[in-house]
Image (cartoon, helix red, strand yellow):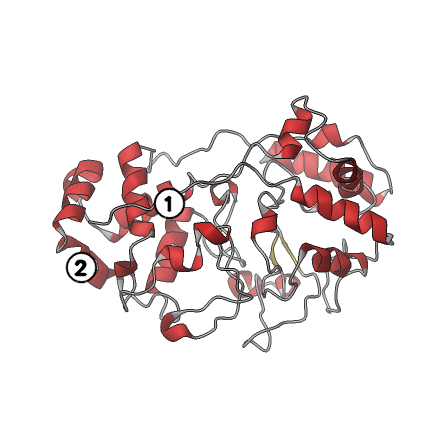
Amino acid sequence: MKIATTLFAFLVSFLLAGQAPAEESFYQPLPEMKHPADNPWSKDKEELGKALYFDPRLSGSNWISCATCHNPGLGFGDGLPRALGNGQKELGRHTPTIVNSGYFESQFWDGRAKTLEEQALGPIQAAGEMNQPLGDLVKELKAVSGYVHMFKKVFGESGISSENIARAIATYERAVVSKNSPYDKYWKGDKKAMSASAVKGMGLFFGKAKCSICHNGPAFTDSQFHNLGVKQAGPLKEDLGRYNVTKDENDRGAFKTPGLRHVTRNAPYMHDGSEPTLEAVVDFYNRGGGEAKNKSAFMAPLGLADAEKKDLVEFLKALEGDPIVVVLPDLP
């Protein structure tokens, strides 16, 4: 964390001074995924987590699975401005992708969960989402002999419990990684991996457009929270964001910086799904965002020409990694 903080401060000092250090100074390939000491990886655990992820029995209606909103065919999102929860009721926020979520320092748009294990149980028991009491879920899974066998194989005598359900799902989610993008290939020596337009866009991303002030590091996120002045769309009149977690007035209307790898698959954009395309997102930033009392000091008009905006979008497209191929599991 200290290294990341130092790099962040160094980067901000350059960009706020109007300078653009060489892009290679900030190229960071994705490191090997780390697993918590109390939830080490195993192939059997990942396969168990995958089965649970796709199983609608995790919801009270037996209709909604994790994959309903985090669909592999839709970039591990749902393609909707805002998620649909229990009873097909529209929720207040856009479904965040789980791609590369194992690298994030916190989960959910407001960062209320510190780990994927904690995050995994949140939507399951939320009345507006999957609406499944954890005690009922444990009983339901214990009635399925295939799950009894799988849990015992992975977790031994502790078997089926809410904690082990969370550990298994989190293990599967950590396997959903976007890597080997044209951007990675470019810095590994294949200078034809990115188009000339994308290369120009890379210069803008790390320079004039100042994107990398917040979108930095291997996953292109500072894991911090910012108020961009997004005008709330959807059923919520006002979403206080990070403030709901910290009760700090400085966090009112602030939301987590999303990672940008695989970003082309995650439209629409922003915490409320209010921007339909990457082009619209770039336009939003180019005009300095929206209006808000405590809008981030980093938000200011960029003065990008139409050609520069196009180049920037081409660079964002170059952050898409290899296809994430998912074979649906046979459920117990």
Residue 39 place in picture, x, y as percent: 33, 38
Give the side of residue 326 with respect to residue 186, left or right. left
Give the class, few, some or many, for how many residues have Cα within 10 Å of label 1's Cα (few <14, many ≥20): many
Horizontal side of residue 297 vs 266, given as left or right: right
How far apart are the two marked residues, 2 and 1, measured between alpha carbons? 20 Å
Q: How many marks?
A: 2
Q: In the structure shown, which secondary structural element does the residue marked by tag 2 occupy?
A: helix
Which image quadrant is residue 30 in?
Answer: top right
54 is higher (above) or lower (below) than 199 = below
For the residue marked with disc 1, what is the amino acid?
Ala
Which of 332 and 204 lies nearest the eye of the viewer? 332
Q: Give the answer, above or below, for where 263 lies relative to 290.
A: above
Q: Is 56 situated above or below 208?
A: below
Query: In the rendered structure, which disc, 2 or 1, sits on the residue that comes first in sequence?
Result: 2
Is 173 placed above or below 96 here? above
Residue placed farthest to the top in the image? 189
The residue tagged 2 is 140
Residue under pointer 1 = 170
